Image: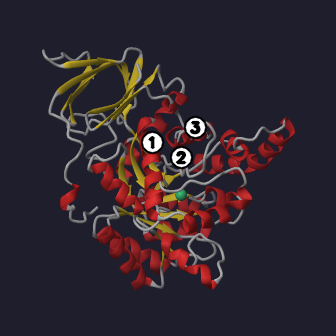
Amino acid sequence: MSRIFAMVGVISFLIVAEHSLAAPQNAVERKRVAIRAARLIDGTSETEIKDAVVIVEGEKISAVGTKLAIPAGTEVIDLGDATLLPGLIDAHTHLLLDMDGSDLSLQDVAMLQAVAMHSTAERALMGAKFAREDLEAGITTVRDVGNSGVNGDVALRRAIERGWLPGPRIIPSTRALAAQGGQFGTLIPEAQNLIEQEYVTLRGAESARQAVRQALYDGARCIKVIVNGTPADVTQEEMKAIVEEAHAEGIKVAAHAIGEKATKIAAEAGADSIEHAYVVPDAVLKMMADKHIFLVPTDGTVRTFVEMSMGTRKVSAEEREEFEKEFKPYVAEEQERLRRARKMGVPIAAGSDMYLSMPGLSRGQASLLVYEAYAEAGMTPMEIVHAATRNAAELLGMGDRVGSLEAGKLADMIAVPGDPLADVTRLEHATFVMKGGAVVVNRK
Ligand SMILES: [Zn+2]
């Protein structure tokens, strides 16, 4: 999370030995299915192919191409005038957090309420709902970056892996590492115990190393660091220690950073991604391009911010205009930094940071609105697809398994009506979702 904190100006693998219990993936028989559609975007090439056929055997793709011969006895799913794509990946989720966006001045209170009044178990159950909604919208993999109580994201991942619940593949982070106070603002001493419910407080480089080791032991597959917190910042030494320790175990580091100082600390230390970076100087963007550090632009459009703020209330035209005026400069700034980042060659991975309720939309549907923000900032539909598939897969360390439609990859794919290269909002309307060879949605 962060968008709102920034907005209101508070600016704010590894492989842990696999748990013996975690074994049974959703059991898909090794049956063969052929999926046909008018078009296909494979996630790696710059053009789409026509008259596409994907052959799936068990949980994996065995062949992809134009007008492939379909072996006798194969079940055929014909999607007609649709476009097949790799399952979408959201590199910045908070499945165990839900806040009301309708009064942004109350974000600090909402955060306290989320942590003080809802147990991790309760939040994991809520996360189960959002995980299903993500999957049904076509998001087949997420990197969940904190705000999930004490290891609630790991519990949710394991429940999905065991087939107890439908949901995307989850890269969990456990609690985010942060300086004193996390993102809570200033709490009285009696309330400060809440901080460790949501964040791990760093107290120097050795404590940072220890925090990484504990996170891995707890089941993290990614380390999330709040470089600039509310109120305090992680130091350069702590950040370096975190990256060193995580990389030694083959684990990536996601750094929440906004502003010159924090983004520089993250980039210099060699974090794998910088989240948000609403404010970031060219010198840091250059370092990100040189070191192949991903930007995860958790952006919104004026329309999404206004609708979030209105909630379910009816507002007058004047009030709507007021909201628009309030958000326009903020959105313009986001767009300008995304344009600079692209020009300098910074790799982009898509991430929604959706933790606020969007009236009338599921969590998955709301999360896909981020693509509209990218489009408004000038990204082409193909760039957006790549940010949400192969780039995000690479950032998550899953590029060998997901993020493209190729023989040998897991059969995670979606289909959207028509051609998303002509209209990127088509990505918001998946009519077909498959995860690991199992059909989750088929609305044709
Ligand atoms: Zn976030």
Q: Is the N terminus in the top left, top right, bottom left or bottom right quadrant?
A: bottom right
Residue 150 seen in the figure: yes
Distance between mark 3 and mark 2 Cα atoms: 30 Å
Q: Which residue is mark 3?
A: 361
Residue density around tag 2, few if under 14, some if 14–19, many if 20 or more, within 10 Å: some
Label 1 CB, ligand 1: below 8 Å? no
Residue 184's place in the image compared with 114, above or below, is: below
Residue 284's place in the image compared with 34, above or below, is: below
Q: Which residue is mark 2?
A: 342
Pick whichever, 99 or 366, lies toward us.
99
**Percent position (x, y) of residue 264?**
54, 68
Tag 1: residue type?
Asp
Residue 273 seen in the figure: no
Describe the element under mark 2 as helix, strand or loop: helix
Tag 2: residue type?
Arg
> Which numbered mark, 3 or 2, is in the foreground of this view?
3
Upstream in the sequence, badge 3 or badge 1? 1
Q: Are marks 2 and 1 in contact (CB under 8 Å)?
A: no
Residue at 41% from the left image edge and 53% from the top image edge:
143
Left or right position of 127 against 17: right
Residue density around tag 1, few if under 14, some if 14–19, many if 20 or more, within 10 Å: many
**Percent position (x, y) of residue 374?**
57, 41
Q: Which residue is mark 1?
A: 134
Residue at 21% from the left image edge and 36% from the top image edge:
60
Tag 3: residue type?
Leu
Distance between mark 3 and mark 1 Cα atoms: 11 Å
Residue 63's place in the image compared with 356, above or below, is: above
Q: Is the C terminus in the top left, top right, bottom left or bottom right quadrant?
A: top left
> Which numbered mark, 2 or 1, is in the foreground of this view?
1
